[in-house]
Amino acid sequence: MPPHPKRKHSKGRRDRRRAHDAMQPMNLTTCPNCGEKRLPHTVCPNCGQYKGREVVEVKKD
């Protein structure tokens, strides 16, 4: 049988443990080519450029 806690942990102790569980906002940067928001170090999904050159060809609808 696994060990069981001897005493109940208080709500403050539980909440201090969960202090780092909150979701973080996404770190978005603006694309220098089109100005659209994108994740850093990734190809822009709007224009397909990365570091000033076209990496992915994006079809225009």
Image (tube, rainbow, N blue to C red):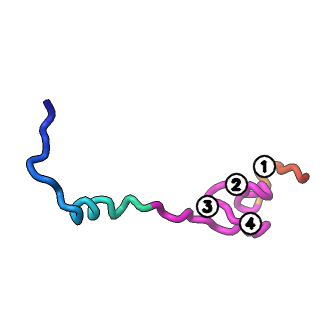
Q: CA distance from mark 1 to mark 3?
A: 16 Å
Q: Which residues are magenta?
A: 23-52
Distance (Cα) linking label 3 and label 4: 12 Å
Residue under label 2: 43
Q: CA distance from mark 1 to mark 4?
A: 16 Å
Q: Amino acid at mark 2?
A: Val
Residue at 75% over, 62% down? 52
Left or right: 8 with respect to 21? left
Looking at the picture, tell me which residue is in the foreground, 24 or 48.
24
Whether the residues at callouts 1 and 2 have beta carbons within 8 Å, the answer is yes
The Cα–Cα distance between marks 2 and 3, rounded to whole angstroms, is 8 Å
Element on which disc 1 rests = loop
6 sits to left or right of 56: left
x%, y% of residue 20? 36, 62
Mark 1 surroundings: few (<14), some (14-19) or many (≥20) residues within 10 A: some
Dot 2 lies on which element?
loop
Label 2, label 4: how many angstroms apart (C-alpha)? 11 Å
Q: Identity of the amino acid at label 1?
A: Val
**Does the residue at mark 2 contact the one at mark 3 (Cβ under 8 Å)?**
no
* Dot 2 crowding, Cα within 10 Å, few <14, some 14–19, many 20+: some
Contact, mark 1 vs mark 4 (Cβ under 8 Å): no
Q: Which residue is mark 4?
A: 36
Q: Is residue 24 rendered magenta in the image?
A: yes
Q: Nearer the viewer, mark 2 or mark 4?
A: 4
Q: Please give left or right for residue 22 compared with residue 43 in the image.
A: left
Q: Amino acid at mark 4?
A: Glu
Q: Which residue is mark 3?
A: 40
